[in-house]
Amino acid sequence: MHSAAVAARVGLVLAVCFGICFTTGLISHYAQSPSQPVPFPTSPSWGYRVTQGLHVVTGTASVPLLLVKLWTVYPQLFRRPPRELRKAALDGLERLSILTLVASALFLLASGLANITEWYPWDFSFRPTHYALAWIAIGSLVVHVAVKLAVIREALGTDVEDPALDSGNATRPSALSRRGLVRASWLAAGLAALAVAGNTVPFLRKVSVLAPHSGDGPQDLPVTKSAYAARVGAAATSAAYRLELVRGDRTVTLSRDELLALDQQTQELPIACVEGWSASGTWTGVRLRTLLDLVDRPAGSDVHLTSLQESGAFRRSTLPGNFADDDRTTLALLLNGEALALDHGYPARLIAPNRPGVLQTKWVTRIEVLA
């Protein structure tokens, strides 16, 4: 079982999963970045839902693949280094890349699984740390593949049961064939993916036994951060609530009733969270551009939104100009035909197409046009 033929085949699928997970992770990181040289697109409205769903699914599928891959190659870590200098240097580079790859991959998968269950038993900031380690993992993966490319090509070009690449002492028989192990690895990866895919694909929720979000919640949408956790209950339900629209020295103040009196629009838009879950809702409220016109906002200018919550990394968010200009971007007052539930952002929340859920600011109290 500890053969290059098995390692190459399992590693190929693992590399595909890692590649998709890395690429979609870059997309998510860029979508959340306050500075975007190229504006993140507003269409398709479901784009972030798909990419983040793929990120979590491929990351989860990588877990059994990585464990099998490590099991097939671990005896190589205990072999004696070659005496020839050039071969010893390549061997040392290979071992260093493997050490870095294994450590970073295990960290990424373990912390990523903790993140989708919203469990954070650490003091560091998850997003920048996860991002930095992803580059280390992908870099060490590229080095590892480059060093082993000749062996990988030869292994993939022969039958998996061919012993041509086996070491001299690899003669002990096994109860399971190599082909059986490879197929079992792929099956395990598929089952792992299916076990969490229901976070994103609604009709799979009944079979996704490891999906931390079932889709249940107030008004048929899950909740990541509740009003209780954000400590906004009193302020959000107070009759004194007002929304401030600000541009320079100009300010317009509106109560919720005054917001309801404005022209309303209804949009079917998904809410997609960085933890991998997503769901669609029917949102009714005031087109954001209509509100911004009250303070004569110039087209294309960015907008700053502030929540009633007193603290937290996403208490404030910046909405790029292309999102503010999009007709679908709404200050939502109703969800699925009913007044917003407190946990979904009552009295008013932002909903925009193709935007991470953590940036769909809830309990909005201030909208400021940036110069």
Image (cartoon, helix red, strand yellow):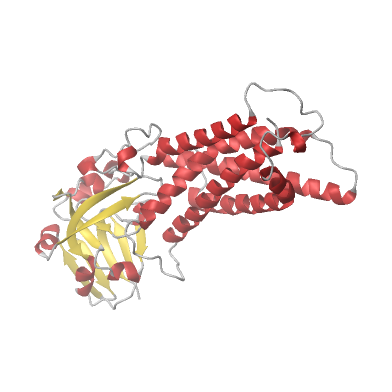
Q: Is residue 54 above or below residue 293?
A: above
Q: Quadrant of the N terminus?
A: top right
Considering every residue shown, the one lying at the far top of the view is: 175
What percent of the width, then of the height, locates residue 225?
A: 32, 44
On screen, residue 58 versus residue 97, left or right, reads left
Q: Residue at x 60, y 45 (%)?
A: 12
| Image position, residue 13 (x, y; %) | 57, 44
Looking at the image, is 198 positioned above or below residue 289?
A: above
Residue 10, position in %: x, y?
60, 40
Picture quadrant of residue 174: top right
Residue 140 in the image: state x and y as whole percent: 66, 51
Front in this rendered view, residue 82 or 332: 82
Residue 106 seen in the figure: yes
* Residue beneath the point at 59% across and 38% down: 66
In-image side of 47 versus 337 (left or right): right
The one of 54 and 26 positioned closer to us in this rendering: 54
**Quarter placement of the C terminus:** bottom left
| Quadrant assignment, res 31 | bottom left
Count of numbered circles on the image: 0
